[in-house]
Image: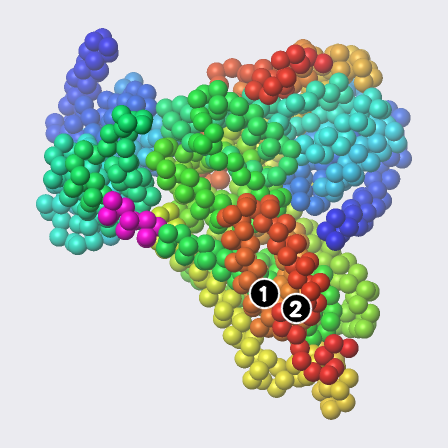
């Protein structure tokens, strides 16, 4: 050990001498960087030292390390920028080493964690308000006694209320183990306003006893501190329960909205024309692939507008899926009306054709669709519950599509025709409704809506040739459960299935939940074959 | 409904492939036929298509260098369409009808289990290129992928180590079938041996093709909030990985907080994912495309050329991965053994294979074990980079001998060689 510290000291001297030779006034003291030449623990010590030292130069070195541009040769710490090599300590160019000779340091999770704390420590004092808030949150999660002086220094300078609140809680976490009971009580009270399960566990440990039987003693000797902790604990538990139940309902709604988007188009085509369209899932796939193509065009021609690609993809996907639907209807289904078994087989064949076409054109592997920045991330409810933006957007989008469809069905002449044909095809034809044209249009709209569903799915699920196969069963489940020919039925069935299966999943696991949901549907259909909502009328179920 | 659909799809596809394959069989005599048994349609097509391509590349390369025993190799490609019973039918057809000397194929353990009896009955020869759960040793099968002690165990050891984050609690998450169940059984026993208690292990399975991981991610977060350092070991297979990793990114579960190490996610699977939110998550393999050595550089260049020349879709972005490397190594080992034996007779080739060595793209010279039909392989642990490749953060110094019968499963002590 003695030898090692001696060695490190000498190394430091040598590095210092080297740095001095290059530049008279080193920006970062070279001793700070010695650790980078050592093992992982040495590197982490160096990162922490840089974080404590602060300043733009420290930040520059940490940035280089994170980007994988920091290297060490013969105990010299170097930054590689393109073809030039800089001395890390002084920031001056090094001429005797080529960029290609520098083997850069590997960054693993341990280093990355140390980096984010060090960077947060740097920003906490000098960054902008949102930066300081993020930094305080990062440091608060791993609050350790060594950080307490930093928190206190930051609190003294901080004026923004939200950042102060986070800092006070972070300091409180450390103070919870302070020898002074007044400090501990204050800390326990301060922590009442967090929603972090980790803090909850800290407080829960305080109010409990340690040891066995009669020898057990309170973990916290001071009764007033225990009382404060218990009160904070109750407040935290309330908020955690609230956040977690909100989370469960949200995941259910989210699954429901996806089921709804997958099933809405089918509710129209199946409802109106009675065609069991096995290729419906592939229309979702067409919509998702259209989104992929639009993303590709944006990446090539409008890289600055890439965040808008999903919006542009909506009309494109609708049009392409609707066109595919029209072609399917005109070429195949038209000739098979009134023969459900044949049309089932024919659409099955069409689905295989579409899958294979996608495989030939785009290849068999899944495609990568990146969420636009405004759909990435989420709202943090605390307690580990995050509501992702992409799911929130999809829930609203499902509502929007539903509204459009409802308006179309209730407020337009076409919608009236469609409803008339749904209720009684022969009679509608008799009073002059062009049933053949209504069929084509309804099929086009149903297919187009499936295309829109495909755009939404592309943001959260796999995009591949066989993606539609996974949704066809679910979509039929929703339509049959809701009642044929009913938009309202589809909505209730989709949301109900979503919430129920998420509730079951949390309780029994994904595999059992799937089985239970299918069993439930079988029983339900036996008891009530017409679905939740049935069409009323004399000719409704001929 | 679903399986019937698969069946019809399989029928249509196999009929069309048989039609393409027929004229190839016409000229034979002085060629050696080699069977390729990988799904080119269905759920596994994503992964297995690349293996068929690699096999064809290796055969083309061997032919260009003069073939084997002076004869050219003639590939016979069949498509078992991700349909497990069809695997055994196609295997039977390859051996008894096409008279192939050797078969390279299978990905999922269930497909291997369904062809094993066929190879045994007809005394064929199969090279299986994918990491698997062990607990098997067939005379007619050579395993060029990893056994659990060459992938799963070292990865968990890394997570337990200081460098890997010193994890104390583990989530074992997998798809519900034989490979994840067996691997997690082995890992649970291993963790017990390392002092991890049952209440610190959370095991969860999802069906094949599961696409909604919200609840599971929420459960992982809840489990991780208990205060001890938590890590996730994922044996999720196939398509489900994309929604899983997307949800992981969206839920803000960062690798620095809860690292996820995966055994079935490689370069090919990450092609469908935006990897920026996933930086730092881990995978354990015996090969990564990002390994820097001349053999690997040549291998990657050859594959990219081949993909361009043969019109593989998206040929400019193709990647190489571990099972592809294992396929390539397997074909070359077979070639060496045939040359040593001087014949393609199954029993003589099996005898000649023991102890064969090959300089693999992983940068190591791999040896086929003398008794257990597995390769001695190096283990690499990589962290996901922003470009979908992996940075190697840990590796073994030398190749490790496979233990197909895990010592962590009771009753395996007596089972060793064949």
Instruction: Judge from the rendering whether residue A238 lies leftward or rightward of residue A536; answer left or right.
Output: left
Decide: is A355 above or below A337: above
Instruction: Judge from the rendering whether residue B330 lies leftward or rightward of residue A156; answer left or right.
Output: right
Residue with the most extreme front position: A214
Instruction: Judge from the rendering whether residue A464 lies leftward or rightward of residue B2; answer left or right.
Output: left
Please provide the residue range marked out in magenta: A230-240
Q: Which mark is first along the chain, 2 or 1?
A: 1
Mark 2 and mark 1 in contact (Cβ < 8 Å)? yes
Quadrant of image for the C terminus of chain B:
top right
Q: Chain of mark 2?
A: A
Circle 1 packing at 10 Å, graded few (<14), some (14-19), many (20+), is many
Does the stretch in magenta take in A234? yes
User: In terms of secondary structure, what is the magenta stretch mainly?
Assistant: helix
Quarter of the image where one finds residue A449: bottom right
Residue with the most extreme left position: A156
Decide: is A353 above or below B173: below
Is disc 2 on the same chain as disc 1? yes
**Residue marked by disc 2:** A531
Q: Which mark is residue A493?
A: 1
Closer to the camera, A259 or A101? A259
Residue under the point 44% across and 25% down = B196
Closer to the camera, A198 or B293? A198
Q: How far across and how far down the image is residue A15, in percent?
A: 20, 20
Quarter of the image where one finds residue A339: bottom right
Residue with the most extreme bottom position: A431
Does the stretch in magenta take in B109? no
């Amino acid at each position: 050990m003695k030898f090692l510290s001696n060695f490190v000291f000498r190394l430091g001297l040598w590095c210092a001498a080297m740095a001095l030779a290059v530049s008279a006034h080193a920006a970062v003291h070279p001793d700070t960087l010695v650790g980078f030449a050592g093992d992982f623990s040495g590197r982490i010590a160096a990162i922490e030292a840089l974080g404590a030292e602060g300043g733009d130069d420290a930040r520059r070195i940490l940035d280089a390390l994170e980007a994988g541009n920091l290297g060490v040769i013969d105990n010299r710490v170097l930054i590689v920028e393109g073809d030039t090599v800089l001395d890390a300590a002084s920031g001056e160019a090094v001429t005797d080493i080529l960029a290609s000779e520098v083997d850069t340091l590997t960054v693993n999770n341990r280093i990355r964690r140390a980096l984010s704390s060090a960077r947060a420590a740097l920003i906490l004092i000098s960054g902008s308000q949102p930066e300081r808030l993020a930094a305080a949150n990062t440091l608060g999660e791993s609050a350790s006694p060594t950080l307490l002086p930093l928190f206190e220094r930051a609190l003294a300078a901080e004026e923004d209320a939200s950042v102060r609140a986070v800092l006070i809680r972070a300091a409180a976490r450390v103070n919870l183990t302070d020898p002074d009971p007044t400090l501990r009580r204050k800390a326990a009270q301060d922590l009442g306003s967090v929603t972090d399960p980790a803090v909850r566990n800290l407080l829960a440990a305080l109010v409990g006893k340690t040891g066995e039987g009669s020898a057990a003693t309170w973990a916290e000797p001071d009764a007033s501190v225990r009382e404060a902790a218990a009160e904070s604990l109750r407040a935290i538990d309330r908020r955690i329960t609230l956040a977690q139940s909100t989370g469960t309902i949200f995941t259910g709604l989210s699954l429901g909205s996806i089921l709804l988007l997958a099933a809405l188009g089918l509710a129209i085509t199946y409802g109106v024309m009675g065609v069991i369209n096995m290729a419906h899932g592939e229309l979702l796939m067409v919509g998702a692939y259209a989104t992929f193509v639009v993303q590709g065009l944006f990446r090539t021609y409008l890289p600055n507008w890439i965040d808008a690609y999903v919006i542009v993809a909506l009309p494109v996907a609708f049009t392409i899926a609707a066109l595919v639907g029209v072609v399917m209807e005109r070429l195949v289904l038209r000739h098979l009306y009134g023969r459900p078994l044949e049309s089932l087989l024919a659409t099955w064949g069409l689905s295989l054709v579409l899958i294979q076409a996608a495989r030939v054109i785009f290849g068999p592997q899944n495609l990568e669709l990146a969420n636009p920045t405004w759909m990435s991330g989420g709202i943090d409810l605390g307690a580990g519950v995050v509501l992702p933006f992409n799911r929130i957007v999809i829930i609203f989008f499902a509502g929007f599509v539903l509204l459009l469809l409802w308006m179309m069905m209730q407020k337009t002449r076409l919608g009236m025709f469609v409803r008339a044909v749904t209720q009684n095809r022969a009679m509608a034809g008799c009073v002059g409704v062009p049933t053949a044209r209504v069929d084509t249009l309804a099929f086009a709209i149903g297919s187009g809506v499936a295309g829109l569903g495909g755009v939404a799915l592309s943001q959260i699920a796999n995009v591949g040739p066989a993606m539609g196969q996974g949704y066809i069963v679910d979509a039929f489940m929703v339509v049959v459960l809701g009642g044929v020919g009913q938009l309202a039925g589809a909505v209730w069935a989709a949301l109900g299935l979503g919430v129920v299966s998420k509730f079951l999943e949390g309780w029994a696991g994904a595999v059992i939940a799937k089985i239970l949901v299918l069993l439930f549907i079988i029983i339900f259909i036996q008891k009530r074959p017409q679905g939740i909502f049935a069409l009323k009328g004399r000719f409704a179920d001929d | 409904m679903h399986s019937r659909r698969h069946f019809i799809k399989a029928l249509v596809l196999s009929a069309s492939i048989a039609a393409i394959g027929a004229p190839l069989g016409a000229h034979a005599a002085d060629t050696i036929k080699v069977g390729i048994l990988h799904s080119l349609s269905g759920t596994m097509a994503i992964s297995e298509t690349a293996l068929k391509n690699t096999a064809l590349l290796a055969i083309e390369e061997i032919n260009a260098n003069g073939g084997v025993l002076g004869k050219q190799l003639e590939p016979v490609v069949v498509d078992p369409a991700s349909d497990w019973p069809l695997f055994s039918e196609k295997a039977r057809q390859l051996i008894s009808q096409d008279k192939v000397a050797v078969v390279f194929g299978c990905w999922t353990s269930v497909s291997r289990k369904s062809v094993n009896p066929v190879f045994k009955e007809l005394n064929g020869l199969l090279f299986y290129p994918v990491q698997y759960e062990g607990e098997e040793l067939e005379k007619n099968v050579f395993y060029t992928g990893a056994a659990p002690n060459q992938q799963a165990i070292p990865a968990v050891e890394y997570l337990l180590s200081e460098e890997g984050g010193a994890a104390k609690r583990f989530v074992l998450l997998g798809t519900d079938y034989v490979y994840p169940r067996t691997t997690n059984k082995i890992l649970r026993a291993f963790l017990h041996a390392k002092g991890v208690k049952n209440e610190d292990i959370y095991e969860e399975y999802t069906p094949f093709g599961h696409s909604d991981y919200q609840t599971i991610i929420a459960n992982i977060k809840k489990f991780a909030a208990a205060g001890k350092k938590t890590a996730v070991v994922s044996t999720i297979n196939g398509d489900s990985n994309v929604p899983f990793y997307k949800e992981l990114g969206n839920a803000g579960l960062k690798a620095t907080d809860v690292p996820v190490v995966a055994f079935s996610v490689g370069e090919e699977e990450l092609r469908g994912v935006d990897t920026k939110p996933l930086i730092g998550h881990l995978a354990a393999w015996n090969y990564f495309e990002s390994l820097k050595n001349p053999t690997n550089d040549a291998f990657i260049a050859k594959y990219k050329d081949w993909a361009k020349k043969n019109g593989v879709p998206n040929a400019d972005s193709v990647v190489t991965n571990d099972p592809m490397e294992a396929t390539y190594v397997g074909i070359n080992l077979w070639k060496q053994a045939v040359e040593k034996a001087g014949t393609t007779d199954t029993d003589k080739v099996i005898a000649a294979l023991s102890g064969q060595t090959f300089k693999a793209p992983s940068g190591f010279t791999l040896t086929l074990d003398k008794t257990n039909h597995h390769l001695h392989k190096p283990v690499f642990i990589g962290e996901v980079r922003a470009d979908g490749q992996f940075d190697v953060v840990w590796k073994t110094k030398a190749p490790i001998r496979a233990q197909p019968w895990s010592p962590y499963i009771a009753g395996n002590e007596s089972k060793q060689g064949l």
